[in-house]
Amino acid sequence: MAALATSSITAAQFLSAMSDMKKPTASLCRLLKAHYKCRGRVSTMSLLAEAARFTSFSPANLHYGGLARRIAKHLAISEPTLRLPTESDAYLSLLVDFIKPETVTNKQWLLVMKPEFAEALVASGWIR
């Protein structure tokens, strides 16, 4: 499969990648469902970690980023160049857009789930 531009991933391409993957763990599914159900699909990693029953944002970031890496591998996407908020979040930028702290009224980074990923999540059956 040819490499894709990270801004052009469609819901169908996300779904294709997800269909070839094992369904995520219960914790990651809780995180994904919580993010999907947030108003405007906007949340912080701390709130998503709480929904997934992780003790801090670190494991949530690790698992969400790992999912993004697996999707990128399936879609033959090399490492994205975006480095927000950290280098380790580069792949996560395939699934979410980041809003810097204090851009609006936020004290933490905000994660906005991309609509194409949200559509694929439902179509995959990973969340209900």
Image (cartoon, grey):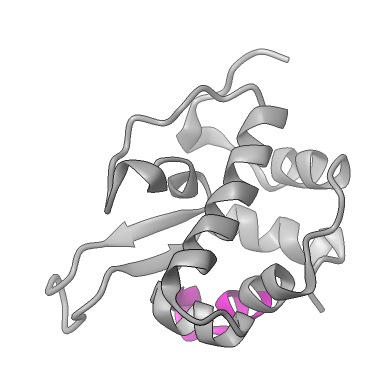
Q: Residue at x 40, y 48 (%)?
A: 89
Examine the residues drawn in magenta and state their main secondary structure: helix
Identify the residue at image location x=40%, y=41%.
90
Which quadrant does the N terminus fall into?
Answer: top right
The location of residue 10, given as percent across then percent down, is: 64, 41
Position above or below: 52 against 8: below
Q: Is residue 18 above or below residue 74?
A: below
Magenta stretch: residue 37 in it? yes
Return the residue nearer the eye: 40 or 110: 110
99 left or right of 121?
Answer: left
Quarter-of-image position of residue 122: bottom right
Residue found 73% across the figure and 62% down from its top: 121
Image coordinates of residue 128 in percent, x first then y, are 82, 79
- For the question of whether residue 60 can be seen, the reply is yes
Please state the extent of the stretch shown in magenta in the rendering. 33-42
Task: Provide residue 36's location: percent of width, then percent of height.
Answer: 61, 75
